[in-house]
Image (cartoon, rainbow, N blue to C red):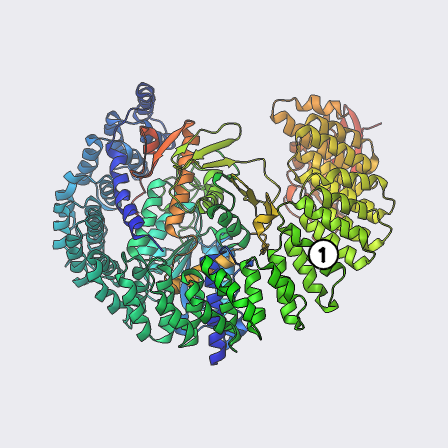
Amino acid sequence: MSKQSVNSKIVEQVHRRRFLKTTLSATSAAVMAPTIIPSSALGRDGAAAPSERIVMGGIGIGNRGTYDLSCFLPQPDVQFVAICDIKEKRRLAVKKIADEKYGNSNCEMYRDFRDLLDRSDIDAVLIATGPNWHATAAMNAAKAGKDMYCEKPVTKNIAQSLILAETMSRTGRVFQAGTQRRNLPHFAFACELARTGKLGKLKKVYAHPAGMQAMMSGWLPAEPEPDKEVVDWDMYLGPAAWRPFNEKLLDGFNFEKGGGLVGGGVLEWGSHCVDLCQWAVDDCLPPVEYDPPKDGQLVARYENGVELIFRETGWIPLGSCPVRFEGETGWVEAGDSGKLVLSSPELLAGRAVEEIGGYPATFHVRDFLDCVKSRSLTKGNAVAACNAHIACHAANIALHLDRQVKYDNVKHEFIDDQQANRLRSEALREPWRL
Amino acid sequence: MPSTQFVNRVAVLTVALIFTAVSSIRAAESSSQSADIETQLLATLRSDAPPAEKAITCKRLAIHGSSAAVPELARLLPDEQLSSWARIALEAIPGEAADEALRNATDSIQGRLLVGMINSIGVRRDAKAVARLTAFLQDKDAEVASAAAVALGRIGNSDAVQALRQSLAAKSDDVRSAVAEGCILCAERLLGEGKSGEAAKLYDEVRKAKVPQQRNIEATRGAILARGPEGIPLLLELLRSSDKKLFQLALGTAREFPGSKVDQALADELAKAKPERAALIVEAMADRTDTVVLAAVLKAAGEGPKQARAAAIAALARVGDASCLSALLGIALESDKDLADLAKSTLAELPGKEVDAKIIALLPDASGEVYPLLLETVGQRRIDAKDTLLKALSHADKSVRGAALAALGETVDLDGLSVLVSQVVAPKFPEDASVAHQALKAASIRMPDREACAAELTAALEKTSSAPTKATLLQILGDVGGANALAAIGAAAKSSDPELQDLSSRLLGKWMTADAAPVLLGLANELQEEKYQVRAIRGYIRIVRQFNLPEQQRAEMCRKAFEASRRPAEQKMVLEVLERYPNAANLKLAGEAIQAPELREEAIQAAIAIAQKVSEKGGNEKELLSQVGLSPVELKIVKAEYGAGTTQKDVTATLRTQAKDLPVIALASTSYNASFGGDPLPGTAKILRIQYQINGKPGEASFPENALIILPMPE
């Protein structure tokens, strides 16, 4: 590799880090997405030097995981070497993708992710199982010394959220939740306006939890269980309580989504849009009070009085996952179209915000890989994910119990509400633990 | 910077959470109501109800169960299917009875189920189980011994610590690793409680044990943080390590390290580090924004290997101040474009008001390439220096004028807007036109009073006779938005100049507020040329479809859109909107559309969909459909075939299933192939033929592939 190409790469990485760390200071003229390194700048046919390469494996790669993988594979410093899935079909499909990418047959397949985690050559993993497995797989990966990009919702309850933050800190692991909107310029800009007082004193932040309902998981009639090599039902159940095989439950997206007694859109979408609201309030501790839903919205309050409002209607049509932040002097709304609407154009202050629609994860993936090298905090780090998920779980508990609940952020318990407190955690099926 | 305090707090509170989850009994909720529920749930557990029912009952007992439920739940613990469900309840039910049940279960249960019991004991932090768990550390089943080690770590009292310490030399690698995990959990707890000396001792014991590298990493991190400033030498040792994982641990731990003593140590280390590591150390230093040694970062920005310089230049954007200005201006003019561009970006962001004052002070005497650089920085930092910028507009050097124009675009207020308008309408230097356009746009879209801004732009629009200038001003008006801009663009949409008409209609078609609706409807009714009429009505339909509107207003707008549409294509778009917002008014309009032969299919489809959705909210679907002329009939499917030529698939059964009491049949999918279980003749156009009876009269009809099935009434 020529000296110039090395240096160009370094500078481009620095440019990216600038975006990721500062996003938009008070004076920056344009808010752009971080640059992706062109392979031509790297020499060696675009491959990274072995010492800079991040060796990766995938755990549970279905539809979403395959998309995530398509963001990882083009990164020149990634070498994807192993796939673990409980479904043979998926193992083979991902191996084919990886082997075609590298022109070899080196991608190893595993049915049990612990075998993949045992490999000392693997630095990081992509976890894109169903939500049932996210936290347990993440905790196992951390204890095995792997950094991880983990899809959302990351946790099934409040206890898991807290243990996630504690474990990532204790093990010194780099963690990125799949909250890719944190690395998109227009959402970042909207949050920055709220966080830095440009909207005046912040009053309300709005999240859009499409499908706001409490759900119960269950047990469907038994069907003949496939061969373990085809579908490993025991591993699929993993930490979830036992139930017989039923093909309908094989859609990980809908299996134990909310962690038992509660779930639904508050967690599924909230892990994105509540997460953005949390960013807008400077990633502070979650709200302390959650009202039951009324007139199509659920209102929660932070300790400083700012309201976090879960609502499904009343948005400017800016695409899915809209958020709105209101201060005393202005407001901003942003959605997946990549567009922003502001109460006053003055809020732009001369800046051009790059419009990236369709919520791509490429920049979020790059943020993760850079942090694996620098050991800095990712945008979707474990503490941020912990707080956002607690807000979602607590709202879900208010929804499920249909009454106001008050949450103590010091003791991490609901005040004078035994039923709500019992919903903070749930036993894992043997032999799994966090 | 990641907050060590936060992380430690989380660590401590996690334990607290788990403890209080099972030990605090508060009777806020109506306890008698919960007791009644518990009685019913226990009856289910005692019955011969199927396992599925008992499983969900366990989950409900997690909320409503008390000590009274414990014996029934304990009976399920040896059951391979229901054990985990029972533990969901037992982990959540407060009180000694649940602890005792789990402890007792460990006497008789083996293997994986036993591991589950031990895990639950750990979650409940049952101190009375320490002796039992200590015994399990010696279990020949490594999974059992490992579970016991982690459970002891979660309990974390002195007896547990002692038991774990003694097992750090266990024979099994797996068990040793779990024991180390237990020790580290205990050490974290001690550290959180302020017992840093005891914590450090325990961390050190793990570091000395033969444990996997990851356990060693966790213990080493703890050993550094527990020692405070005395941990710095160990941190530096890792920073110099040839082991990549230890170096990475140092980078992470350096960010967590409390106090400011570590910052000078990092600065010293930076000077000695290899280039590839120096850049990473700079990043770690700059993440410690409150205590970073700025002089060291500034020095690294100015000299040394390029990669460390780049990292340091970028870091100054977060941690620099006015003292860095001179150095950054110098770097921004270096021949290395990469570093120069980085320095320019940092100049735009360099924190502190003093920076602005210094830049203003430098402007009067600036010359050469420093002058446009300073002007550019004025704009990027939005420093108020209007007089200087206006003066620079007459400068002979194009780059100076360009920088001044761009800076004016970023800084002028409404009073200064006229300067930029005149630069667009009558530029002194024609080659500056493009920059002037961008500057006027930048200024216009950030004006707080956009109506006043639009009025000024409109006045300029009316005065100029240049078509390109008019187009420029219209585009900017489109970006500004608001009532004045809307009126100006609406008027231009009726212009006799086709280019202006084209541009204006495009701008209106993507207007972001609903007040464009009347303007678009007016154009749709007035304009004669089809291209612009269609664009106007489609723009109007877009607002009806996408914007947040009161229900009645939207229904009225749907009707107006339907009436103003001159082609079936747009009328069908309105029908889609009707379907999206189902109500009585929209059903009526869909019913009217059924009368138009070219809309019949889509209108019936919309009417059925609306009626279904309205009936879900309490209406009677049949009555609703009768109102639009879709009365119930007695429909019988005699025979139905799908295919082409001699290849025909009998789909009678499917159609009979889907047929209801309307002469319209909605299939499971809009695709015939999907609805009929596959494509009988791939690659060939197929026909669906149906023989049927309506009200006893025979009929026959054929439908091209995927058409809506509307059966003609037999004669």
- Locate the C terminus of chain B and report the quarter of the image it occupies: top right
Q: Measured from the top left, where is residue B112 in percent x and y?
A: 26, 46
Residue lying furthest bottom in this view?
A2
Q: Chain of mark 1?
A: B
Label 1, residues with CA under 10 Å away: few <14, some 14-19, many ≥20: many
Q: Where's residue B89, x and y in %?
A: 30, 33
Q: Nearer the viewer, residue A259 or B658?
A: A259
Q: Amino acid at mark 1?
A: Val
Q: Nearer the viewer, residue B205 or B447?
A: B447
- Asked which quadrant contains residue A330, the reply is top right
Q: Tag count in the figure?
A: 1
Q: For this view, does B334 lie left or right of residue B562?
A: left
Numbered disc 1: secondary structure = helix
Residue, x 12% and y 50% (percent of image)? B162
Left or right: B174 as drawn, with respect to B505: left
Quadrant (top left/top right/bottom left/bottom right) for the N terminus of chain B: bottom left
Q: Which residue is mark 1?
A: B421
Q: Position of residue A28 (x, y in %)?
A: 53, 58
Q: Is residue B98 above or below residue A330?
A: above
Q: Residue drawn at (52%, 67%), measured in percent from left and top?
A: B362
- Residue B160 in percent (x, y) is at 15, 47
In this orientation, does residue B655 appear? yes
Q: Is residue A22 above or below residue B9?
A: below
Residue drawn at 67 percent across, 54 percent down: B417
Q: Image check: A101 left or right of B496?
A: left
Is residue A108 in view from this perspective?
no
